[in-house]
Image (tube, rainbow, N blue to C red):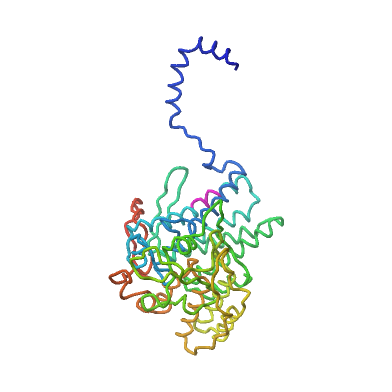
Amino acid sequence: MHAHGIRRWLSGAGVVVLVVLPLQGCSDALKVIDPDIILDANSAAGAIALRNGVFLRLSQAVNGIQGPDALFVFSGLLTDEWRSGDTFVQRNNQDQRVFQPENTFNAGPYRALNRVRVEGERATKGLRTYLPDSTAAVGSMFALTAYVEVLIGEQYCNGTPLSDIEGSTIIFGDPMTNAAVLQLAVDNADSALAQAALAPPRDSLAARKVTRLADVIKGRALVDLGQFAAAAAAVAGVPTTFKFYAYHSTTSTTNQTWALNNSARRYTMTPGREGGVGIDFVTPNDPRLPRIIGGASVFDNSVPMTLVRQGLYGQFDSIPVASGIEARLIEAEAQLQPGGDRALWLADINALRTNAALYPPIGTGLTATRGPTLTALPDPLTDSARVDIHFSERAFWMFSTGHRLGDMRRLLRQYGRTEAQVYPNGSFVKGGNYGDATMMPVPFDETNNFNYHQCLDRNP
């Protein structure tokens, strides 16, 4: 309307406007419209957007959130991968192996993993409704659900409840043993494989990627369950060069391995064996783990600690969560079991070690030292020494990718090692002694779930 027309309209309806507008404003005060939030997948575009959101949630959960920290780095504090060079008590307690459900940094990773699972279900419903032939995309949701279930089964104590949501109603889950969660991961990996097999020809590349991802996840879960032959069979078709990444970028998330170690100096690698045991990731100058020593102090300069920074990931470098290298290591471990071929185990290990093309690249923008190409290992002749080598190889190939804590628990559960042989113990560098945590607790926040009270047990 022109200005003079507006004045005439207001002069005739001014009272009505003054009365009606405030009432209308009050009635709509709680109706908030946010175009950036997808409440329901009520279209094909909405379903695709939800699926994309699950991939973002995955990157956030495993290595893209700081304070509370993402899973890969925070669980790595409990192992021999990372040391706390920080003043935050939450990180120091985790590094000291204090079993503390109330640790406020503990809730973030658990919540983020479950968001991948729950939002994957929503995306799956939308895809099936609005894009019924998008079976490869549906398969990817089943695969990522299986993946976070493997992480939950490996990282947390027995008794993790997997809750769900229907509309706006929370369906509280019952506590589940680690074995039950891992079996659920196997089942969801099988669902991913079945969906990928139904993909139309135009989606063949996506279906193949989903299949390989699901194969590795299934193999990993079966290894955790002690089903080694089945695990080896599951990964047999995965090429050694395969990698599936959690992506980081300027528009999504920063790689927190870089952010907390290289940039903020709140995490550091440790020369030597932390707590007298474990793996020395620094001194061997292993080419699979380039690093940067010195040049600055850790954030907490009240404690003398050498800052050692990793050289694998720059600020926005993506991080592998499943790979063909892991597939070969799964096959090799099957040969360490009763009736296995020890010579084949050693051949599998050395085929990886001596193939320099498989070594990960140095991170973008980093000037790191890489050691010389590895040589073939001789057979150490005893099964105990073979197990030591095998888990060391896994640790170097898959450094800070969420594998180490599950492997340390397996050394206790499947190979009869003692806690003192596997976990850092004795005097803690910042005072006192190491605690007795061998896993992460279900966060205290979960007590809002009336089905959950505490961990069923703390068995490895």
Q: Residue at x 63, y 56 (%)?
A: 136
Q: Could you tell me what secondary structure mostly forms the magenta stretch? A: helix
- Residue extending farthest to the front is 295
* 253 in relation to 398, above or below: above
- Is 325 positioned to the left or the right of 96 in the image? right
Q: Residue furthest left?
A: 432
What is the quadrant of the C terminus in the image? bottom left
Q: Bounds of the magenta span?
A: 118-123
Front-lying residue, 32 or 414: 32
Q: In the displayed structure, would residue 56 be above or below residue 94? A: above
Q: How many marks?
A: 0
The one nearer the camera, 194 or 160, is 160
In the rendered image, the vertical position of residue 54 relative to residue 360, given as above or below: above
**Residue extending furthest toward the bottom:** 381
- Answer whether residue 120 is magenta in the image: yes
Q: Image height check: is 196 above or below 374?
A: above
**Which quadrant of the figure contains the N terminus?**
top right
Residue 236 located left or right of residue 93: right
- The one nearer the camera, 421 or 338, is 421
x, y (%) of residue 189? 55, 62
Q: Is residue 163 left or right of residue 218?
A: left
Q: Position of residue 282 (x, y in %)?
A: 47, 75
For residue 421, what is the image quadrant? Answer: bottom left
Provide residue 270's location: percent of width, then percent of height: 42, 73
- Residue at image point 41% right, 55% down: 67
- Point out residue 179 in the picture as x, y percentages from the top left corner: 43, 66
Tell me, yes or no, whether the highlighted magenta stretch contains residue 391. Answer: no
